[in-house]
Amino acid sequence: DMEKQRDGERWRKGVVVLVAAPFQGHLTPMLELGSILHSRGFSITVAHTLFNPPNPSNHPHFSFLPFSHPQHSNTPISSHNLTTITSTLNTNCASPLKHSLLLHMNQHNVLCLIYDGLMHFADSVARQLNIPSLLLRTTSVTNLLAYHALLHQQNLPNFKDREGWREMEVPNLEAVRFKDLPNFNCPDSEALLKQLKKTVGVRPSLGVIFNTVECLEAQYINKLHQQYLKVPIFAIGPLHLMARQHSSSSSSSSFLKEDYTCIDWLNKQSPRSVLYLSLGSIASWDQKQLTQMARGLVNCNQPFLWVVRANHNIIVNVVGDEEVKKGIEERGCVVRWAPQKEVLAHEAVGGFWSHCGWNSTLESMSEGVPMICQPYFGDQTINSRLLTHVWKLGLQIQYNNNNNNAIEEGEIEKAVTRLLVDEEGKEMWKRAQEMKHHIRQAVTQPAASSYNALDSLVHHLLSLCL
Ligand code: UDX
C-alpha cells in the first residue's frame, strides 16, 4: 500500500524526461541524475537513440522512450567521427523526438525535459511543445567557459595563425592556454567550432545542471553565471557519489561488461602499489603506442592494471619481445573493461594513468587517487591542465607532438616513478586525500554545496507541479 501511495504521489509530481546522448561518458551521469531525481519522488522517462541504448532491465524504475534516427554506421565511435555523429543526431532527431514525446504526453504528465549538452536539438523540441527544460553538462564549468572564450577569440584578427597563440593564456581563465582548447588539437576545427556555437547558444528555460563540485570550480561557476549564463546553475556532482548517497539503486550503465577478475588480482597486490591505466570509452592507443606502453610499463617494475578495449590479445601479438611478454604476465593484469569505480576505490591502486575524461577525473578525485595525464581530445586537455596546474593532483606525460604524439623513450618509467615512488608523488597523494575529503563533504553534509544545490533543483522542479 505504501508503495502504491508513493507511486500515486510520483504520478502527481509528474514525469521528468531525460534526453540522453549515446556515449558512455554522457549516458552514465544522465542515468545517475535519473536515479537521484527518482529517489526524490519524480517519475523518470529516458528518451534515447537506437544505437548505444541503455539497458532497461538494469533500470526497472525508469520508463524508456526510444526515438528513431537515420542508421548509424557500425564504425566504432572514435575521436575522428565523434563530431560527425553528434551533428548528424542533431540534424535528424528533432522530429522523431517530438513525435515520441507527443505520444508520451498523451498518457503522462510531463513536467520537464532534461537534455544532454550534446543533444541540443532537444532544446527546440521542448520549446515547441511548451515543456520547461534543463540542460545537463557532463563536462566541467571551466570547459564551457573555455568554449565561450574560444568563440569570442576567433573573431580577433590573426586568430587563424594558431601557432602564435598556442602558448598564450586564455584571458580570464588562468592556467588554461590556447593550446589546451579543444580546436587546437582537432583535425576539423571548423566543424567543431560550428558545433560549439550551437551547444553554447542553447538557452534551457529552467537552468543548467553541472556534474561538478563547487570546491573544484567555485570561481569559474561565478564567472560563468555573471558573464554568460544568466539561468540558475546547479552544481550537484559528482553524480556517481550523489546517486550512491541519495538513491538506493546503483545499477551499471556500461556498454561493455565489466571484468571483475581484476578485483581478485588487485586483492593480491600491496597497498598503493598498482598503476591503473585506461583511456575511457573513445580514445585508444595505436599499435605503435601500445608497444611503447608495454615496454615502458614492464621496465617500471610496478604492478599495473591495464584496460585495452580493442582486444587485449593484441598486446601479446604486437609485442613480439619475449622479455616484455614475460613482464606483462608477471606484473600486469589486462582487461577489456574494468569496474572503474571499484578499481579506483581499491587500496592497492596508487595512481591512475588517464586520458582525463571528465568522468574519470571526477571518479579519481572522489577516491583520492593522483593521476598521470595523457589527454587526447575535446575537454581532456583542459581537465589535464586543471589537474596538473590548479589542483596539483596529476603530472602530465611528455609527448612528441611532431611524431604522432609518441612518448619519448624513458618517459613512461620517469612518470610512473614520479607518481608511485618519489616524494613528489607522495605529496600529490596527500593533496588527493584532502580533495577526496572536500568532495565527500559536499555530497554528504546537508547544507554543503552539492547537497544544497540538489535541494534547490528539487524545489525548482516541485514549483512546476503547482
Ligand atoms: C567522453 C569524453 O572523451 C570525455 O572527455 C568527456 O568528458 C565525457 O565524454 P570518455 O572518453 O568515455 O568520455 O571518458 P570519461 O568521461 O572518463 O568516461 C568514461 C566512463 O567509463 C567512466 O565513468 C568510467 O568509470 C567508465 N569506465 C572506463 C569503466 O567503467 N571501465 C573502464 O574500463 C573504463
Image (cartoon, rainbow, N blue to C red):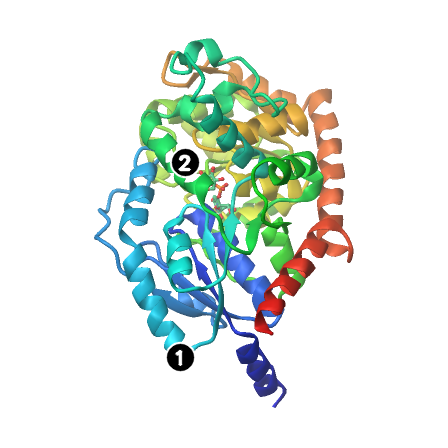
Q: Position of residue 18 (x, y in %)?
A: 46, 60
At x 36% / y 32%, what residue is drawn?
192
Image quadrant in which you'd find residue 377 = top left
At x 32% / y 67%, what residue is drawn?
100
Using residue 387 as the reference point, say whether residue 67 is left or right of it: left
At x 37% / y 37%, what residue is drawn?
195
Using residue 322 as the reference point, say whether residue 349 is left or right of it: right
Counting other residues with Cα less than 10 Å from the Cα at mark 1, is it few (<14), some (14-19), or many (20 or more)? few
Q: Which residue is mark 1?
A: 107
Query: Does the closest atom of ligand 1 sit within 8 Å of the Cβ of label 2?
Result: no
Report the disc number at residue 398: none
Q: Position of residue 254 (x, y in %)?
A: 44, 54
Give the farthest residue toward the top.
164
Residue 222 visible (yes or no): yes
Report the disc number at residue 197: 2
Label 2 – label 1 distance at C-alpha: 36 Å
Task: Identify which amino acid the numbered label 1 is placed on.
Answer: Gln
For the residues bearing labels 2 and 1, Cβ distance under 8 angstroms = no
Task: Identify which amino acid the numbered label 2 is placed on.
Answer: Lys
